[in-house]
Amino acid sequence: MSRRIRVGVLFGGASEEREISLASGLMIAENLPKDRYDVRLLDTLALMVRHPALTPELRDQALALRDSTPRKSLPSHDGLSKAMREQVERAEALSQSATAALSEGGDQGIDVAFLALHGKYGEDGTIQGLLELFGTRYTGSGVLASALAMDKVMAKRVLAAEGIPVPRGEHITREDLAKDGLAAIERATGLLPAVVKPSKQGSSVGMSLVDSRGAMEAAVRLALDHDDDALVEERIFGAEITVGILGNRDVEALPVVEIVPKREFFDYQAKYDPALCDEICPARISEDATRTAQALAIRAHRSLGCRGYSRTDMILGPNGPVVLEVNTLPGMTMNSLLPKAAAAAGIPFPELLDRILRLALEPSS
């Protein structure tokens, strides 16, 4: 009998979405079929001991991981539910350093990495590039597609060039604000009512809804607190929907999910607290709108060169669906959208994870 495939679930890391990544990774590890996979939870924070951007708390955690010494739990994000906090604490307790598993072969090594990282240093092509150097197969998109999708400004340019409908927008950098902030803010106010967000963040971190000229500068500065680039987009009113994609050369669109937040918008807290949002699948939209949204998700996935799986967020406006962004490593928590869409398509969570790993192990050509 052949041995089980050694899987390293890479999670944690140092982004502002660390906790969501920990929760995602734990769910993946607990639900991968045990008869096929030998699974280890590997925190990539251990790879970043010398990184200058780490806070003192994260550096201490990275050192403890690397040296296999006792770790302290980091302060929890205020927006997490009690159940999510418990998941995060359990994930941290079970995690190991990713260093040896990635750099060594033999029994210490892994056959494939299941990426459960979100945000900077994980969803942006950086860990993908490292895995390419090691020759380790991994789930999801490659270096270029990951970097493009994570950068909302660049992704929007590519999607628009492919004829995919996107909101009108303005790109504002820190340099723009320093050189001629008044002109930059004036350009942005032409889009009111608007959505302002960092270009390279996820989970609605640093995002604002802006309805007045007076609130625009504060919203742009908030976005720039989280990134060097801010994206200001016209706010399109309509149903918020998302479409998951599975596949490499042959792709399929999953059922459309409709997102109905019980607060002003689908912010960080609403994303991870089921009490603050209703997620309806299949979405309560027409068959024509469903087909259009699924076709757009497939086009967006292919336009950015995505692989394995992705999730495309949209607004169903008065003129049809408009693409907001493409997620190359969608969340896999208890309240995540891609698993819900897969379940509606008759794909249980363990089978979804198995399919994602099989796609990662497929020959690239």
Image (spheres, grey):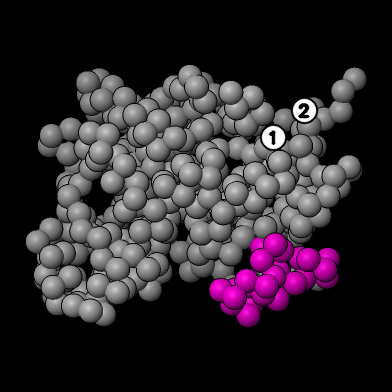
> In percent of the image, x 40 and y 38: which residue is there?
304
Q: Secondary structure at mark 2?
A: loop
Determine the image quadrant of residue 95: bottom right
Residue 253: percent from left, percent from top: 41, 25
In the rendered view, would you say 249 is above or below 219?
Answer: above
* Residue 186 showing in the rendered view: yes
Q: Main secondary structure of the magenta part?
A: helix
CB under 8 Å between discs 2 and 1: yes
> In percent of the image, x 78 and y 52: which residue is there?
103
Crowding at dot 2, Cα within 10 Å, few <14 / some 14-19 / many 20+, comes out as some
Residue 79: percent from left, percent from top: 46, 64
**Three-letter amino acid code at the position of disc 1:** Leu
Which residue in the protein does label 2 denote?
36
Q: Let me know if residue 286 is in the magenta part.
A: no
> In percent of the image, x 70 and y 76: which residue is there?
60
Viewer-proximal residue among 153 and 241: 153
Crowding at dot 1, Cα within 10 Å, few <14 / some 14-19 / many 20+, comes out as many
**Three-letter amino acid code at the position of disc 2:** Arg
Q: Secondary structure at mark 1?
A: loop
Q: Is residue 155 left or right of residue 7?
A: left
Determine the image quadrant of residue 357: top right
Q: Let me know if residue 59 is in the magenta part.
A: yes
Residue extent of the magenta highlight: 45-69
Residue 127: percent from left, percent from top: 60, 52
Residue 330: percent from left, percent from top: 49, 43
Placement of the C terminus among the 4 image quadrants: top right
Quote the CA–CA distance across marks 2 and 1: 8 Å
Which residue in the protein does label 1 denote?
32
Viewer-proximal residue among 30 and 60: 60
